[in-house]
Amino acid sequence: MEILFVLIGISISMAVIFLGLFIWAIKSGQYEDDYTPSVRMLFDENKPKEIKK
Amino acid sequence: MSDLKACYHCGDDCHVEIKQDDKVFCCNGCKMVFEILSENGLNQYYDIEQKPGVKPVNSGNKYQFLDNEQISETFYDFKSENQCKITLFLPKIHCSSCVWLLENLTLLNEGILKSDVHFTKKEAYISFNPNKISLKGVTHLLDKIGYPPSFEKKEIRSKKKLNNSFFIKLGVTGFCFGNIMLLSFPEYLGLSNDFSETISFFLQLVIFGLSLPILFMPAWDYIKSGYKSLRTKHINIDVPVSIGIITLYLKSTYDIFFEHNASYMDSFAAFIFFLLIGKWFQNKTYNALSFERDYKSYFPIAVSKIEDEKEVITPIQEIIKEDTLLVRNGDIIPVDCILTEGNANIDYSFVTGESMAQPIELNEKLYAGGKQLGTNIKVKVLEKVNQSYLTHLWNQTAFKQEESSYSKLNTKLSKYFTISIIVISIISGIIWFNIDSSKAVNVIVSILIVACPCALALAVPFTFGSTLRYFGKTGFYLRNAFTVEDISQITDIVFDKTGTITYANTSDISFIGKELNKEELKSIVELANNSTHILSRNICELINLSISEKKLESFEENIGKGIFGKFNNGDEYKIGSSKYIELKDEENGNTKVYIKKNQDVLGYYLFKNLYRTGFKEMIESLKENYTIHILSGDNDQERENLEHIIPIKENIHFNQKPIDKLKYIESLQKTGKSVMMMGDGLNDAGALKQSEVGVVLSENIYNFSPASDGILSAKKLTLLPNFLTFSKKSIIVLKACFAFSLSYNLIGLSIAITGNLTPLIAAILMPISSISVVFLSVILIQYIYNKTLKNN
């Protein structure tokens, strides 16, 4: 049963890493806009073109 | 139903068909946008959505203030030699095509480096090279393609939205909560009896460690708020919450370190987590709307001052007495002033509610907030901006009040709740002290723990939060969830007339005169279509014929007075005011647009107030439960019409100035009434602030509206009785949820008083009570929505 010390230690550390990633994702502003990316995803790629003046 | 073709760009009816390639457009503006997009290879705009365009309205000199460096500087987010970044609010963004076009802005002008759109906020973040294009250039480009930017202070919009730090707290709390529960599993399943001392203690230590972040972040906020409330001798919901938190935490810490027993940390974590979820649910805000605007958002940012014969763009706050200003057609008069030069024709409908524009003589006074309809005029300033007759309104105490952001019912309940819990715990403690004194402390602590108002604290966020969302879905946008409670308590409803119960831009039009034949009607439409004046547009819509063959040769517009056109068969038409067609007319308060063909006056179009469809029926269903009032800034032309509709004739008042409206609401409140004010313009700003619930009725919810508690989309005015019923029923739901959660408290109390509370029981009771109360409130509100608002 002593293995529990190690197991819990490892699982908590892994979970903390993911928590850190979550905090980093929020701080990077990824969730500022949760609607426009869904629209943007459906656009076609722009074909390169010379602009007429 | 008209058989007119729809414009390929914006979808409006084409009264006069303008053809390009093989497509039809309603006006030259739309055609021009189409041409700009085609030339630059941006036709995909039309593939993403049908008829995605917005009819461009010529903004004229609206953006002139950007020439002033000092003013432009204030808008930049970032400025360097080769790159400028700016955030622009574009209220016309409405579909995915808009997003596509605006994010491809770089193709329209090489000075633009990058642009990103935030759809829900209706903002565009644009980077551009100031050496290749100026801010004014960017603004004009956006205006040309139909997305004119609106320059107003960013703080006015999207205030109070939950920011990132809240979500981080929520995430951390959820993380700790989940892990604490996981580590408590052996305890729940009764397996911890097989553990050795060291392992048990180790698990409890880890649990304690996980509880620390929760204590220092969100829990601390609740405790601080509860303490603040006690200091002001009031008890709000945070007081029993804090009592619960502190008791849970201290008892658990004691249990872990001194008794080496299982603790209540899982209930502690669950409690905080559920509270945060409630807070998140309650805080729904509408990012692109604003409930905070004052006159500063309506007035222009800068005006043209005449200095030594030259025009200088000056910020509005720097205008002082005796300055001379130049005011153009469509401009807002920024200050109280005297007319010194030109023909003034002022539309005061937004500021005083008078529906007809007033011609003003030289040396007469002009008031701030009116709109000039006519040619350029010069004026001499009498007062500074914040000293004008209108802006004095904002000095009233009504405007200094803080907006409420708590539920009154909740607070009342918390008071009784807290006091009863303390009394019960003291009595139980005394009783137990006499029976078995060792258990007394335990029982007191158990009572305080189980009385934790988790379910109670969730009833309000979920009931009002759901109601808020359903209202928004149906076109009624509230400032915050607590407005629902205020709405449920109103007794009187006051309506403004112009623009609120009447259409601002459409009228009841009838033609008085000779019967017009088809050719004459077609000529009128073709001529009127060239003018952007609201009355011309209304005439085109009324006649409703399409023109495919153009017969008009020349066109001349005398802004604010009339239009003149020559046709290729020699006919000359004049459309305009009686003065314009040189006819004497007795003024009787109604708008008349005359038609003159060659030398004959064919007749006139009479424009009367058109009441919104369904208004009469709505008043019928409201009058049983509410007292109705009408306050109008207009003359009493409409008294007779309104007296047929409104039950109590004494409640209809005309010629009300903005301050009169405020005082009227005040006098109603002194007699104990709770008032809802419904208005649309600056003339209602005082009344909207003074009343318990101020609602702005708006044809376009993203346009300017004075500060309010709610914005109702004009199309949904007739649903007002439904909204009012819904709010009353939501209070009933709230009370049901309170009762339900209190029943859990009773069960828990009976267990605690008899000294049988264990962490396991608490850990079951708390989530069950919370989830069932949330479930109950959501289900009941959904049921009420289906009955009152759905299918409308």
Image: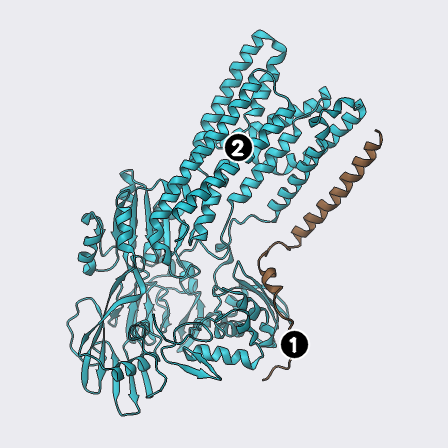
Chain colours: A brown, B cyan
Is the C-beta separation of discs 2 and 1 under 8 Å? no
Tell me where residue B269 appears, x and y as whole percent. 64, 34
Dot 1: element: loop
Tell me where residue B689 appears, x and y as whole percent. 36, 49
Dot 2: element: helix
Give neighbour class at mark 2: few <14, some 14-19, many 20+ (Cα, 10 Å). many
Residue B751, picture quadrant? top right
* Extreme residue toward the right, this view: A2
* Pick the front one: A23 or B193: B193
Name above or below for residue B464 compared with residue B575: above
The answer to whether residue B233 shows anywhere in this view is: no
Residue at 41%, 74% (x, y): give it: B307
* Extreme residue toward the top, this view: B434
Give neighbour class at mark 1: few <14, some 14-19, many 20+ (Cα, 10 Å). few
Q: Chain of mark 1?
A: A
Left or right of residue B189, residue B411 in this image:
left
Gap in Å between the C-alphas at discs 2 and 1? 57 Å
Tell me where residue B216 appears, x and y as whole percent. 65, 36
Residue type at mark 2 is: Ala
Residue at 64%, 55% (x, y): give it: A30
Q: Which mark is residue A47?
A: 1
Residue B769, picture quadrant? top right
Give the residue at mark 2: B455
Q: Quadrant of the N terminus of chain B?
A: bottom left
Residue type at mark 1 is: Lys
The answer to whether residue B368 shows anywhere in this view is: yes
Q: Chain of mark 2?
A: B
* Pick the front one: B545 or B553: B545
Left or right of residue B644, residue B60 in this image:
right
Name above or below for residue B347 compared with residue B641: below
Residue at 26%, 43% (x, y): give it: B624
Q: Which mark is residue B72?
A: none
